[in-house]
Amino acid sequence: MILNDFFKAVAQLNDSAFKRVLFLGLGLTIALLIGIYAGWLWLIETFADGPLTLPFVGEITWIGNLAGWGGLALILLMSVFLMIPVASAITSFFLEDVADAVEAKHYPLLMPAPKVPFVDAVRDTIMFFGVLIGANLLAFVAYAIMPFFAVPIFFALNGYLLGREYFTIAAMRREGRAGARAMYRQNTAEIWMAGLLMAVPLTIPLLNLFVPILGAATFTHLYHRISARSGAIGSR
C-alpha cells in the first residue's frame, strides 16, 4: 500500500502545481546563493577600498580580485553541499500546494483544507531543517565508530525524520497539530516505513531535489488511507 501511495505521487510529478513548487524552490535557492556572493563582493568593496599596504612588501593591488574569485569559488563549493538541504527547506514552505493538488485530483469530494498560518509554517520548517541537519551531524559520530552500520543508521534515522515531518504536514492540515501527533503515535511503524522509502531518493543526485514534493504527495495519500481506516474525518 505504501508503494501504491508513492507511485501515485510519482505519476503526478508532471502536475503544474508540483513543477511550480519545484522550480520555485530551486529558483529561490539559486537566488539566495547569488545574494550571498553579492553581499561578499559588497563587503570587499566597502572594507578593502584601495590597495592593501604591507610592511616590507608595499602595495598589494590584487587582494580584492583574489577575494572576489575566492568568494565565487567558495559559493560554488557551498552550492554542492547546501543546494539539496537549502532547496528542501525552501520548498517545504510551499508543500501545502502539493497536498492541495493531490487532493484536487484524487480526493475531489473533500472540502478545501484550511491554510496553515505562515508563521506556523516558517516555524515548523526551521525546526525540521534544524533537527534534520543536527541529527545527521551527530550521526557522523556513529558512522565513525560503527562504519559497517553507517548505511542502516542513515536510512533508519532519515526514514524516521522524513516520515514524521511529512506525515505531520499532511495530517495537520485536516486534523490540527494535536490530531496529527495522535495519528502519528498510532501508526508510527507504517509511517517510518514510508519515510524509509523517501530516504532512498535522498541518496541519488538530482533525484533528491524531488524528495520534498514526493514526500508531501506520498504522505498525503498515506494520511487519507489511515484516516479512512481509523474513521478520523478531521475537518473534512
Image (cartoon, rainbow, N blue to C red):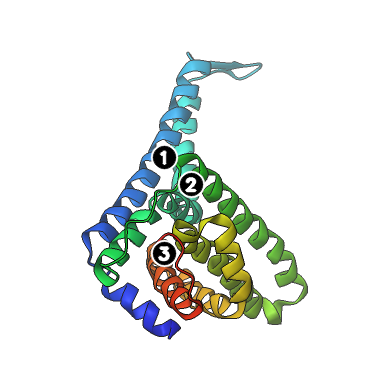
User: Which residue matches tag 3?
Assistant: 216
69 displayed left or right of 110:
right
Residue ranking furthest to the bottom:
1
- Horizontal arrangement in the rendering, residue 94 relative to residue 55 (left or right): left
Mark with earlier residue (1, 2): 1
**123 and 10: which one is in front?**
123
Give, as a three-letter code, the residue at label 3: Ala
* Sequence-wise first label, 2 or 3: 2
Q: Quadrant of residue 41?
A: top left
In the figure, 107 relative to 135: above or below? below
Tell me the SS state at disc 2. helix
Judged from the image, the secondary structure of the residue bearing numbered disc 1 is helix
Q: Which residue is mark 2?
A: 121
The residue lying toward the viewer, choosing from 58 and 35, is 35
Mark 1–mark 2 Cα distance, whole angstroms, equals 19 Å
| Marks 1 and 3 in Cβ contact (< 8 Å) | no
Measuring 45% from the left and 28% from the top, which residue is drawn there? 39
The residue pinned by badge 1 equals 32
